[in-house]
Image (cartoon, helix red, strand yellow):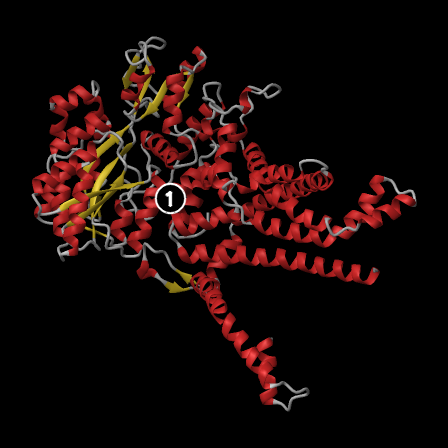
């Protein structure tokens, strides 16, 4: 309600020549955390600026398509962007967002966790303010399987699941979630898809990832609909009781409360499983960074609004109301976050150890290439996959059909 | 063409007299249809020309500085990639199977509609309902029906518990084709009904007197006389089916599990990768395919009408 009234006030002012409206394009956060941040900041700004919360589609691909199309057309309507962590290089290289220089750089980086910080860095500059982070944990049924040891691997988990006649929930639909999984498996084997210089570099770790994927895909531990399951189907599968293991984001924990009975109590958590026994796992890294559009009319105000939106209090709210982990280290020690996440410490460790997805302007092309190469899970042939992936990613980077 | 004939009298001595009044009327006719012609040029001619222009450029919206003229380079890239040919094959599979099924089913429906003695109106209306449903909505209905966890198909008798059509390429094709057939058979039927109405009853009666069986009458009288209508129906549906997008986009998002059609490819390249140069080349190639299909059917239609005229 407050938001609607606020929005009316702004359009009235706009008519008078003032352009203090800051349009924030970001995904629709259902928990109300973003609504609260916007309302708080508008109150605090006391008329200096007025943030309008403009909701993007829930699908990550559609969000990106909308933002990219509008920025390419130099849309003045966008001031502030809730950027998925994987967009930074693409938007920065195209010159659509402004860097956080000088004092702003300090504001954007101070006290932030290492993982989220890596996602806003491109060519030595900082292109966004890390707001919320995200990572995946291994969820398991305490009443059915043993607590996984620290060096638990995918292979061990798979053997155990086959032994017990249960399944493992993953995200293997041909979409961004598949890239998330494969990237984590490759990074867990010590590999990467794009090196520090930003060039594609595929090696045998890509084969290792395919081995784990196809082993699960072909095994009896593959859940029904595996090749079309995304985060939510995995959550439902785990909640239905058909699986004792699940890798997924922390949103599954509050959701488990609705299942009833002892379900949530029996839900255990552990660090993301290892690819290789002797190497620590590299969990996936997600989240939202705040970027300032080059085409907005009042970028200075947009920077200011971004600082307010991403302050410690609002990060805590996002964790409590939206299940979105903070990016500022100290926020993990607040009562609010500790209460929201009994596993807050594990989350922080996972985010610190996480492997960001490739930081390159051609990210979305490379991701599509990975998705095509690794789908469907039961049809992937680890032999020759390195060559196929290299071939596709090369074509993707060169802007060719693949 | 007509413009040339209007101008003709002023250039060469008129062979037959065009009265002032006729000339004024022609001028008025041109003035009256000019807005429509201009609108058509603006909304179809310009985009097509612009797409051709873009298809000759290396042009990615994210790297506007790298824009350069590459001639037919984009076309070479598309035509030498295995992805394009796989997608053409996928599209042809979907088109051929769904249009054939639609033709057979459409014909059966038409015969029922034509011979329906009571409730003609309700029968026709009922058959047309699927065509009135938005494609995306219909696609969602089919997707949910076949969903391995929540769909009802899995629970039907005679369906194996482990069959999960949406988890395999072949199964996905099956669902996509079913959705396509279910949705557009009524359209096929509508076009065929118009053709069937043209077959005179007297011919059937005469053939009956001569002792022709029902089958003989259907294949020797109904089908040949309906041939132009059948070809027009096939033309429309083939053109439509070749550009299939919505059903695949919903049932296997992004053309997953290798169900990508040429239109999905064009979308992925143009909208997702914002590589408008390469994407335009894909679009132009689809356009050329569509023209080839149209030319084929129009040629076939031409010979069939010519034959008919010769025979009668």
Task: Name the quadrant containing residue A34.
Answer: top left
Q: Residue furthest right?
A: B210
Task: Name the quadrant containing residue B46.
Answer: bottom left
Image point (14%, 23%), residue name: A336
Image point (84%, 50%), residue name: B203
A232 vs A54: above or below: above
| Residue A365 spot, x, y in % from top left | 38, 46
Please state if B111 lies on the left or on the right of B75 as rendered.
right
A185 vs B104: above or below: above
| Residue A305 spot, x, y in % from top left | 13, 44
Q: Which chain is home to disc 1?
A: A
- Residue on which disc 1 sits: A366
Quarter of the image with the C terminus of chain B in it? bottom right
Foreground residue, A210 or B224?
B224
| Residue A225 spot, x, y in % from top left | 47, 26
Foreground residue, A204 or A313?
A313
Image point (59%, 37%), residue name: B182
Quarter of the image with the N terminus of chain B in it? bottom right
| Residue A384 makes an appearance in the image | no
Image point (79%, 59%), residue name: B308
């Amino acid at each position: 309600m407050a938001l609607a009234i606020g929005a009316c006030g702004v359009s009235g002012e706009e008519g008078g020549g003032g352009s203090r409206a800051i349009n924030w394009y970001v995904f629709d956060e259902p928990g109300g955390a973003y609504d609260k941040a916007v309302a708080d900041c508008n109150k605090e700004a006391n008329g200096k600026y007025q943030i309008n919360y403009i909701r993007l589609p829930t699908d990550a691909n559609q969000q990106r398509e909308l933002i990219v199309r509008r920025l390419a057309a130099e849309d003045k309507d966008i001031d502030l962007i809730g950027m998925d962590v994987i967009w930074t290089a693409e938007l920065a290289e195209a010159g659509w967002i402004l860097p956080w220089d000088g004092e702003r750089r300090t504001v954007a980086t101070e006290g932030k966790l290492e993982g989220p910080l890596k996602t806003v860095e491109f060519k030595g500059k900082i292109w966004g303010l890390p707001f919320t982070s995200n990572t995946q944990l291994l969820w398991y049924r305490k009443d059915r399987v043993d607590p996984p040891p620290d060096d638990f691997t995918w292979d061990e988990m798979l053997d155990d699941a086959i032994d017990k006649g249960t399944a493992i929930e993953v995200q293997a639909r041909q979409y961004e979630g598949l890239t998330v999984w494969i990237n984590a498996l490759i990074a867990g084997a010590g590999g990467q898809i794009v090196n520090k210089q930003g060039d594609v570099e595929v090696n045998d770790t890509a084969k290792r990832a395919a081995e784990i994927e196809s082993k699960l895909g072909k095994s009896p531990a593959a859940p029904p609909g595996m090749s079309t399951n995304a985060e939510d189907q995995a959550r439902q599968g785990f909640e239905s009781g058909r699986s004792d293991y699940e890798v997924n984001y922390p949103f599954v924990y509050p959701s488990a409360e609705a299942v009833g009975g002892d379900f949530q109590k029996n839900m255990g958590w552990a660090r993301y499983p290892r690819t290789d026994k002797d190497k620590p796992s590299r969990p996936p890294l997600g989240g939202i960074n705040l970027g300032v559009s080059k085409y907005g009319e009042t970028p200075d105000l947009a920077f200011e609004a971004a600082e307010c939106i991403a302050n410690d209090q609002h990060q805590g709210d996002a964790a409590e109301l939206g299940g979105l982990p903070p990016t500022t280290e100290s926020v993990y020690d607040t009562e609010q976050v500790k209460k929201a996440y009994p596993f807050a410490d594990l989350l922080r460790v996972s985010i610190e150890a996480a492997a960001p997805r490739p930081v390159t302007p051609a990210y979305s092309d490379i991701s599509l290439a990975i998705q095509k190469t690794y789908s469907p899970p039961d049809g992937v042939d680890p032999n020759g996959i390195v060559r196929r992936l290299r071939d596709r990613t090369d074509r993707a980077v060169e802007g060719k059909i693949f | 063409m007509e413009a040339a004939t209007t101008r003709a009298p002023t250039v060469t001595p008129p062979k037959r007299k065009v009265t002032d009044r006729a000339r004024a009327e022609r001028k008025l006719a041109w003035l009256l249809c000019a807005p429509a012609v201009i609108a058509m040029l603006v909304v179809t001619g310009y985009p097509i020309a612009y797409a051709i222009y873009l298809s000759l450029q290396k042009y990615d919206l994210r790297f506007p500085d790298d824009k350069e003229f590459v001639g037919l380079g984009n076309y070479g890239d598309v035509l030498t990639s295995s992805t394009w040919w796989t997608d053409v094959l996928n599209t042809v599979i979907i088109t051929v199977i769904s249009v054939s099924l639609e033709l057979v089913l459409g014909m059966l429906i038409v015969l029922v509609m034509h011979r329906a003695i009571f409730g003609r109106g309700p029968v026709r209306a009922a058959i047309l309902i699927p065509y009135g449903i938005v494609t995306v909505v219909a696609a969602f209905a089919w997707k949910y029906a076949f969903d391995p966890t929540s769909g009802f198909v899995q629970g039907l008798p005679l369906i194996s518990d482990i069959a999960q059509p949406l988890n395999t390429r072949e199964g996905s094709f099956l669902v996509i084709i079913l959705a396509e057939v279910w949705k557009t058979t009524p359209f096929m039927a509508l076009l065929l009904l118009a053709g069937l109405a043209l077959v005179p009853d007297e011919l059937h009666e005469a053939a009956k007197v001569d002792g022709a069986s029902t089958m003989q009458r259907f294949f020797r009288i109904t089908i040949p006389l309906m041939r132009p209508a059948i070809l027009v129906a096939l033309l429309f549906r083939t053109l439509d089916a070749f550009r299939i997008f919505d059903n695949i986009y919903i049932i296997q998002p992004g053309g997953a599990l290798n169900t990508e059609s040429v239109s999905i490819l064009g979308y992925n390249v143009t909208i997702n990768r914002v590589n408008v140069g390469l994407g335009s080349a894909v679009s132009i190639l689809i356009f050329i395919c569509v023209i080839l299909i149209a030319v084929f059917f129009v040629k076939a239609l031409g010979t069939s009408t010519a034959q008919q005229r010769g025979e009668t």
